Amino acid sequence: MTGAFTVEPSTLIAIVAMALTTYATRVAGLFVHWRHAPGPAARAALDAIPPAVLIAVVAPMMLATGWPETIATALTALAATRLSLVATVAFGAACVVALRLALGG
Amino acid sequence: MRKDVADGVRDILPAMIAGAPIALLYGALAVGKGMTPVETSLSSLLIFAGGAQFAALELWRSPPPVLALAFSTLLINARHILMGASLKPKLGQFSPLQRMFGVFFMADENWAMSERRAAARALTPVYYLAMGVVFWANWGLWTTLGAIGGAFLGDPRRIGADFAFTALFVGLVAGFWKGRSTAVTVAASAIASAAAYRAFGPPWHVAAGALCGVGAASLYAMRGKG
């Protein structure tokens, strides 16, 4: 068993790459000079980045894994309109466990 | 000065409480993906961007795909550029060093609180940094506790934890919801990503879904004018 204090070089490289990328996005705003504010299409594109990326990451689980996962996603989306974030996660996990038992997955 | 520290901590406290279970979950899932507790803590302390960190775990394998991880991180955190640009005119009291150091702590929640503060009075470095540092330390602390606890969790699939990302991201997207435009984005992204995943495998699905989602949103905005 690897110890809790082990740091793999390849893991460290990945973490540092993500940290530098993130810092670059944070510091870049200090150097932005806009002649004029972004237009409606550019604005809509910028607003769409977080949901588009988040969904792109999990779409294989949502749509290309099996029926339990797809149905659980639909139920979770309904729950997300009324529950807190943490409650939504707990609900989603419970749904997928139940559906895998029921449908076999 | 002491008042500014107290105000900063008070303003960010609700976000710290809400963030604690999310950080616990991140820590537990990260060790489930094979990271050690120290690696997991380092990731939260150095990256300090929840959405990108969860996305990274979903793409995580051994050895880690560094370029795909950096690209996904860049896409998810691109919003910081806008946040920083919006905050910049309010940093009049900050020295250049305080600005460069201070933006490291800029997350959605404390950025929003700083914008709100700046609307009412001058934003001081003490207020901003006190808030940022406690919020950052909170994220790191709960991540570490989750990583230590998660090592005893066993098979994540048994309790549906492998589905936790999907549920979490669905919940996060609900928070970004801006009506039909978001629905168009989500549908385009989901279909393109799943198709690319089937056709080419990871990590291409992230770029395919992100580009199609963003493209669909801007097309919708142009056609929807009027």
Image (spheres, grey):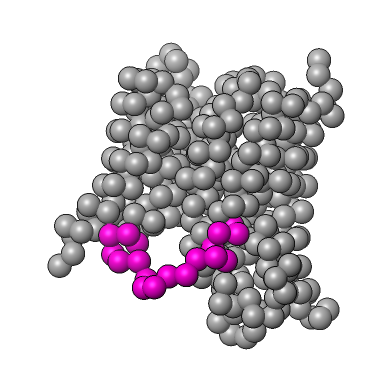
Which quadrant of the figure has residue B103? bottom right
Q: Nearer the viewer, residue A77 or B213?
A: B213
Q: Which residue is the extreme one toward the bottom? A: B121
Check the image and report above or below for B192 versus B13. above
Residue at point 50%, 66% (across, down) = A32
Q: Looking at the image, which residue is at 68% across and 59% down? A: B105
Using the image, determine if residue B188 lies above or below residue B134.
above
User: Residue B153, how many percent across, how many down?
Assistant: 71, 25
Which of these two is toward me, B23 or A53? A53
| Quadrant hosting residue B37 | top right
Residue at figure coordinates x 59%, y 52% from the top left: A24
Asked if residue A38 is among those painted magenta in the image, a careful observer would answer yes
Which quarter of the rendered picture does the C terminus of chain B lie within?
bottom left
Magenta residues, start to end: A26-43
Residue A87 place in picture, x, y as percent = 55, 45
- Give the percent coordinates (x, y) of residue B109: 59, 61
Q: In the picture provided, is B152 more to the left or to the right than B180?
A: right
Q: Is residue A55 left or right of residue B117?
A: left
Position of residue B39 relative to residue A104, above or below, is below
Q: Quadrant of the N terminus of chain B?
A: bottom right
Percent of width and height locating residue A81: 41, 51
Residue drawn 26% across and 47% down? Answer: B216
Asked whether B216 falls inside the magenta stretch, the response is no
Left of B179 or right of it: where is A27?
right
Residue A74 is at least partly visible in this image? no
Count how many numbered circles sit on residues in the image: 0
